[in-house]
Image (cartoon, rainbow, N blue to C red):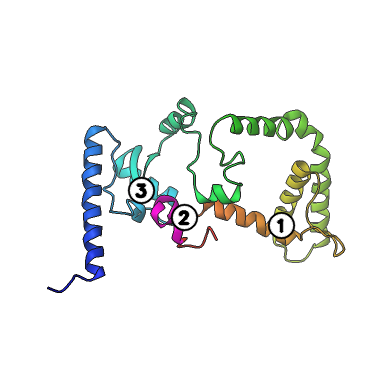
């Protein structure tokens, strides 16, 4: 008798895994009253229903399944609220329960293992970080003390634009510089980008590129976050 090939064994293993997954999910749904939602596919769940603009995909799905629905992202169940009333339940009434973000690769690698306030789980560390932000950066008194910075940078912005009168101007670049300068001077005490060739700090374009990359990496959809057993492959290269 010819021994089955590795491909046949792999297909048999996958079929068995799929069957077990369906049985477990069916039993779980019978035990708990869960929100309505589309039937998930094996392994990927409902990821096939989420397009490049997730908020639009959720809106279309909510028309069919209601203001609160359950989706399956890979190995994880996700509940989506699609109305102000439901959002209030998650963000205010039960805010502490849902305060922590999922532990994704973005939080691990861009915030030193979930150390900043954006990715830190709700708890003493998060509350202390929030207190520092409110007292040292966003309190009315502190914002008043930084007014001279905003005035100086606004004058500098107007001067740069005035010098370019009659020429084609990409406003986005000048506003990005204005924002980065204000934030870095108020939060870090300096501009942190090079104004001249003799300066050893980074160039404005380099700083802007780093900030853009940080925002981008924190918003990308990383397959390994939702299908953990594939995370070691780093299929999209985001972790690298």
Q: Secondary structure at mark 1?
A: helix
* Residue 201 x %, y %: 80, 58
Q: Is residue 201 left or right of residue 71?
A: right
Distance between mark 1 and mark 3 Cα atoms: 37 Å
Q: Is residue 125 magenta?
A: no
Residue range highlighted in magenta: 224-233
Kindly report the secondary structure that dominates the magenta region of the rendered protein: helix
Measured as percent of width and height from the top left, residue 219 is found at: 53, 51
Which numbered disc flags the more N-terminal residue, 1 or 3?
A: 3
Q: Nearer the viewer, mark 1 or mark 3?
A: 3
Would you identify the image quadrant in which residue 126 lies? top right
Marks 2 and 1 in Cβ contact (< 8 Å): no
Please provide percent x and percent y for residue 9.
23, 64
- Residue shown at the point (28%, 39%) measured from the top left: 36
Image location of residue 145, percent across then percent down: 81, 34
Residue 37 higher or lower than 215, as above or below: above
| Mark-to-mark CA distance, 2 and 3 | 13 Å
Q: Reading the chain from its start, which is encountered first: label 2 or label 3? A: 3
State the residue at coordinates (56%, 54%): 217
Q: Is residue 216 left or right of residue 223?
A: right
Q: Is residue 225 magenta?
A: yes
Tell me the residue that label 2 is attached to: 222
Q: Residues within 10 Å of mark 1 (few under 14, many from 20)?
A: some
The outermost residue toward the right is 198
- Residue designated by label 3: 75
Real-space CA distance between mark 2 and mark 1, rounded to the nearest whole angstrom: 24 Å
Tell me, for residue 207, which label it has, or none. 1
Q: Which circle marks residue 151 in the picture? A: none
Residue 10 in the figure: left or right of residue 98: left
Residue in front for this viewpoint, 125 or 94: 125
Hey, which quadrant is residue 131 in on the image?
top right
């Amino acid at each position: 008798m010819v021994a089955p090939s590795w491909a046949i064994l792999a297909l048999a293993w996958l079929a068995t895994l799929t069957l077990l997954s369906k049985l477990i999910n069916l039993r779980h749904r019978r035990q708990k009253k869960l929100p309505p939602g589309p039937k998930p596919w094996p392994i990927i769940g409902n990821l096939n229903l989420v397009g490049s603009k997730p908020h639009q995909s959720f809106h279309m799905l909510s028309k069919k399944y209601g203001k609160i629905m359950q989706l399956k992202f890979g190995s994880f169940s996700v509940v989506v609220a699609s109305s102000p009333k439901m959002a209030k339940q998650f963000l205010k009434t039960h805010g502490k329960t849902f305060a922590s973000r999922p532990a994704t690769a973005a939080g691990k690698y861009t915030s030193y293992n979930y150390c900043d306030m954006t990715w830190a789980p709700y708890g003493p560390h998060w509350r202390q970080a929030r207190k520092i932000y409110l007292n040292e950066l966003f309190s009315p008194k502190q914002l008043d003390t930084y007014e001279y910075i905003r005035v100086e940078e606004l004058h500098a912005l107007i001067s740069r634009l005035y010098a370019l009168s009659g020429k084609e101007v990409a406003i986005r670049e000048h506003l990005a510089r204005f924002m980065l300068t204000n934030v870095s001077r108020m939060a870090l005490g300096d501009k942190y980008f090079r104004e001249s060739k003799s300066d050893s700090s980074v160039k404005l374009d380099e700083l802007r590129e780093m900030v853009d990359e940080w925002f981008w990496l924190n918003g990308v959809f990383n397959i390994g976050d939702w299908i953990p057993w594939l995370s070691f492959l780093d299929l999209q290269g985001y972790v690298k």
